[in-house]
Every structure is written in C-alpha cells, then in structure tokens.
Amino acid sequence: MKYVAVFDVGGTDVKYGLFDPADNTLVFKQSFPTCAENGAPFIYNNIIDKINELKQNYDLMGVGISSAGVIDSTTGVVLNATKTIPNFIGFKIIETVSSATGLKVTVENDVNCFALAEIANRPNVKDFVLITLGTGIGGAIVVNRHIYRGFSFASGEVGRMYVGDVTWEESSSVKALVSLAQAQELPINNGIELFKLYDEGNQEAIELINHWFYRVAKGISNLIYLFNPEILAIGGAISNRPTLVKELMPFLKETCDATYLKNTKIVHATLQSDGGLYGAYYHFWANYMKV
C-alpha cells in the first residue's frame, strides 16, 4: 500500500501526516516545532529527516507540502515571504526535498491549500474568500472554484494590507493579540490560555479580545467590500473555537454595511486547522494522480 506524506509548515509548528489514496483518508497526523527563527534550510532538513523516517515504515509515492510564503507552485521556489522565516526567499523547496528523498514533491502556499480543502468540502460554493488567523494572517481568493493566484502567484496576501497605520497582520494576528496580552502582564503563554481567561470573565482579557475582534472585523469588512464573496471562511487554530463566528458578528455589524454583510456568510473553515494538510494532499493528487 502506497501513501502520500503531507506537511503543513506554519510559523509555530510543522504538522505532518500520511494520506491513503485508496480512500483519500488522513491515516495519522503529528507535529513538531517549526523553530522558524533558525531559517529555511534548518526547517526543511527536519522535514527531510521526517520523510526518511516515514520511508522506513511506509511505502511513499510522494510528498505534498503546504508552506507559508509566496510560492511558485510550478517550480517550488519561494518568491517572497515575511521575516518570520529567515533565508526563505529564493529557497527551492521542490528541488531540495525531492533530491534528498528521491520522491515526487509538490508545494503550494498554505492558505491556498486551505482553500483547496474548502473547495473539496463545499461543492456548491463557487466564489469565496478564506482567511487564516494564527502566527500571521493569510488569505486565499477562489473564483468559480479555482484559486486566483494573481500575475506572479502573490494574490491573497491579505495580512499585508493596511488597516489603519499598520498591517492587518501586525495588529490582528493571534500572535499580535498574545503579545499585547503579555505586555499587559496577563499570565498566558498562548491564545488558548488567553481565551480561557476571556471565558472565565477576566475583564482585562475581555477588553483585549473585544478590541481584537473589532480589528479583525475591520479587515474582513474590507474583503467583503472588495470581493463580495458568497462566503468568507475562517481557518487556523482559532477556528477550532466553536463560538468564534458568533462572537465576531456584533463587530462585523459595526464595521460592515448591512447590505453587504447579509450577502456574505461568515463561516468556520470546514477542516479548521487541518485544512493545510488536506490541501497539500489535494494539490499533490491534482498534479500526479488525477486522471
């Protein structure tokens, strides 16, 4: 039995797993720290090591990778990226991984991978925008069930748009929220712990998160005005919070004209934080397995 290994390279963790192409199921998933500050070669050497470990126990037909950055999905070269991962621009992902493992490799931008998973799971939706909230803020644009990549693979970089005097990512990523909470000396290490305080009624946490909801809503409103999508889906780890959309809606009603808002449904991404893994598999499938 042959499997496809998949990796989703995030700013905090690298998720990975195996897909069984016989029934398109994710057999297992695990993760390890990205250690992004160590740079692209370090990250991909760890991925190569993990692939070679998997090869000892599984017959692999190839590798699908979901990665942050502006990715030329045809060549596997990183065209642009933020400073989260040093030495990333110009890195040859497909060439590096394929030559070290002897396997077929595909790579696609991480949020585009989320969008591929969303396309597969929403067969009746033609046009939508997907955003991911996490270490950064990413976006993908889907038109007539195809990802719009732009002239140079760089569309959907919504975290870089300005909301006020700073980029949306700088003010409204979950990382930015956690950093602000820590600067105010709240006893938290991550977003999960901060939202726990929020749920427990901690007033300082409530004020911080409400301000964050407002900033997130401003960015989403801009996307609704710009694209008039049928749905706007929210992915990333924060989308595992079942009450997220309900909590966000009052702030969207403040920042978005009612006529526009009523025509766009705000939803959780169907696969929440696992969309990158599924999308990496679907991208590999489209390149090497589709008849």
Image (tube, helix red, strand yellow):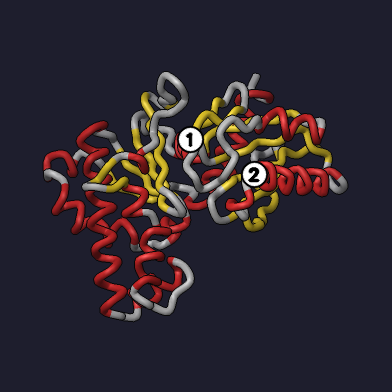
User: Distance between the Cα atoms at labels 1 and 2?
Assistant: 14 Å
Q: Does residue 19 appear in the picture of this structure?
A: no
Q: Residue beneath label 2, please? A: 7
Relative depth, front residue between 13 and 5: 13
- Mark 1 or mark 2, earlier in chain: 2
Instruction: Tell me what residue is drawn at x 65 percent, y 36 percent.
Output: 64
As helix, strand or loop, the secondary structure at mark 2 comes to: strand
Question: Eyeballing the image, is 184 above or below 134?
Answer: below
Is residue 192 at all visible to an observer of this figure? Answer: yes
Specify whether 286 is left or right of 3: left
- Residue 134 percent coordinates (x, y): 44, 54
Residue furthest to the right in view is: 56
Residue ID at (42%, 47%): 132
As drawn, 199 above or below 49? below
Kindly identify the residue that appears in the image at 41 percent across and 25 percent down: 148
The residue indicated by pointer 1 is 112
Give the left or right position of residue 253, taking residue 162 as reference: left
Do tag 1 and tag 2 residues touch (Cβ < 8 Å)?
Answer: no
Could you say whether the residue bearing mark 1 is in a helix, strand or loop? helix
Dividing the picture into quarters, in which one does residue 289 lie? Answer: top right
- Decide which of 257, 69 is in the foreground and name it: 69
**Picture coordinates of residue 223 (x, y %)?**
26, 38
Front-most of 216 and 1?
A: 216
Q: In this image, 86 relative to 51: left or right?
A: left
